């Protein structure tokens, strides 16, 4: 069974930075593509970024967020710079198999494994 644990969330002022980490275990991370999603207060979970055979970002975070994946250490990261109040959300990392077909990296339905989430709060 694959397990994911996010960390690195917290309270930060607008314009600040945070680096989220996703520790994975159970199976080597090089068997998976990784995505980050977020759920703002009172809203649906939404795509933020993914790394599969390419990297993908939702438009609102392009140029500010960077996703990365360290297969040797089974870790994933989301570097978030120039944070805005609207980035406030619970952030989740997720995985789906590199052997899966017909999956979209920006679709929640593609992902088989999820972490518990980490809260990011950006104050004005």
Image (cartoon, rainbow, N blue to C red):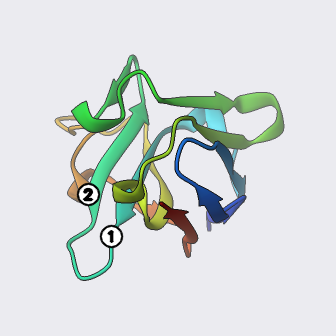
Residue 63 percent coordinates (x, y): 42, 21
In the displayed structure, does residue 43 sit left or right of residue 35? left
Query: Measured from the top left, where is residue 99 in percent x and y?
Result: 39, 34
Q: Residue at x 40, y 55 (%)?
A: 87
Q: Is residue 96 above or below residue 113?
A: above
SS class, disc 2: strand
Residue 59: which quarter of the image? top left
Instruction: Locate residue 83 relative to residue 12 in the image: left or right.
Output: left
Instruction: Please rate how many residues cluster around mark 2, counting C-alpha atoms within 10 Å: few if below 14, some from 14 to 19, many from 20.
Output: some
Residue projecting furthest to the front: 124
Give me the residue at 26% from left, 57% from top. Answer: 46
User: Would you say 114 lies left or right of 99 here?
Assistant: right
Q: Pick whichever, 18 or 118, lies toward us.
A: 18
- Up/down of 87 relative to 45, above or below: above
Residue 72, image quadrant: top right
The residue wearing badge 2 is: 46
Give the vertical position of 89 relative to 116 (above or below): above
What is the secondary structure assignment of the residue under circle 1?
A: loop
Q: Residue at coordinates 54% horizontally, 71% vertically from top-left?
A: 117
Residue 30 or 59: which is nearer the viewer? 59
Q: Residue furthest left?
A: 102
């Amino acid at each position: 069974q694959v397990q994911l644990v996010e960390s690195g969330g917290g309270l930060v002022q607008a314009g600040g930075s945070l680096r989220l980490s996703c520790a994975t275990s159970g199976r080597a991370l090089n068997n998976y593509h990784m995505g980050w999603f977020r759920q703002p207060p009172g809203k649906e979970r939404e795509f933020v970024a993914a790394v599969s055979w390419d990297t993908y970002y939702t438009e609102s975070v392009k140029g500010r967020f960077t996703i990365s994946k360290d297969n040797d250490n089974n870790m994933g990261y989301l570097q978030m710079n120039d944070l805005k109040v609207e980035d406030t959300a619970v952030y989740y990392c997720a995985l789906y198999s590199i052997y899966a077909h017909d999956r979209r990296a920006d679709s929640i339905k593609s992902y088989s494994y999820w972490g518990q989430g980490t809260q990011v709060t950006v104050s004005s």
